[in-house]
Image (cartoon, rainbow, N blue to C red):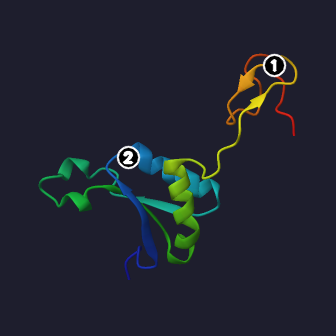
Amino acid sequence: MTPFADKTCVFRHPNTMLVSHVRNVLDSAGIEATLRNMTLAGGAGELPLDQCEAEVWVAQDEAVLAEPLVREALDGPALRTPGWRCFHCGEWLEGAFDTCWQCGAPRPA
């Protein structure tokens, strides 16, 4: 039995930093992820291209949970948080900010 018999690939890409980011997102969500092919990019041409890309693998029963997290890691959150005006200094801030960059006041609840 191979060590990956009960696992499935949920993401593959030639950019190893992006692959590592996806793995970190899954790990922070409590999904154990394993990286494969992280150093095979130099073999492209000698090996088939699809076998040289870095990959993220998870347990088969966690793939359904992992796939939406992978999409969010690549595309950003599905719902955008609306912008807001700081109640303290009046600065307009994008929704991604929880603290006013101008005066440091927290976003109102």
Q: Which residue is pictured at 57% across the width and 52% down the height?
A: 25
Residue at 53 percent across and 50 percent down: it is: 73
Q: Which of 96 and 23 is in front in this view?
A: 96
Q: What element carries label 2?
A: helix
User: Which label number is shown at residue 29?
Assistant: none
Measured from the top left, where is residue 17 in percent x and y? 42, 43
Residue at x-position 50% and y-position 47%? 21
Which residue has dot 2 on it?
Answer: 16
Depicted 96 relative to depicted 45: above or below:
above
Is 48 left, or right, of 55 in this rendering?
left
Frontmost residue, 32 versus 10: 10
Residue 104, position as x, y percentages in the image = 80, 21
Residue bearing mark 1? 90
Residue type at numbered disc 1: Gly
Residue farthest toward the bottom in the current orientation of the protein: 1
- Residue at coordinates 69% horizontally, 36% vertically from top-left? 95
Residue 57 falls in which quadrant of the image? bottom left
- Local crowd size for mark 1, using a 10 Å CA cut-off: few (<14), some (14–19), many (≥20): few
Secondary structure type for disc 1: loop
Picture quadrant of residue 85: top right
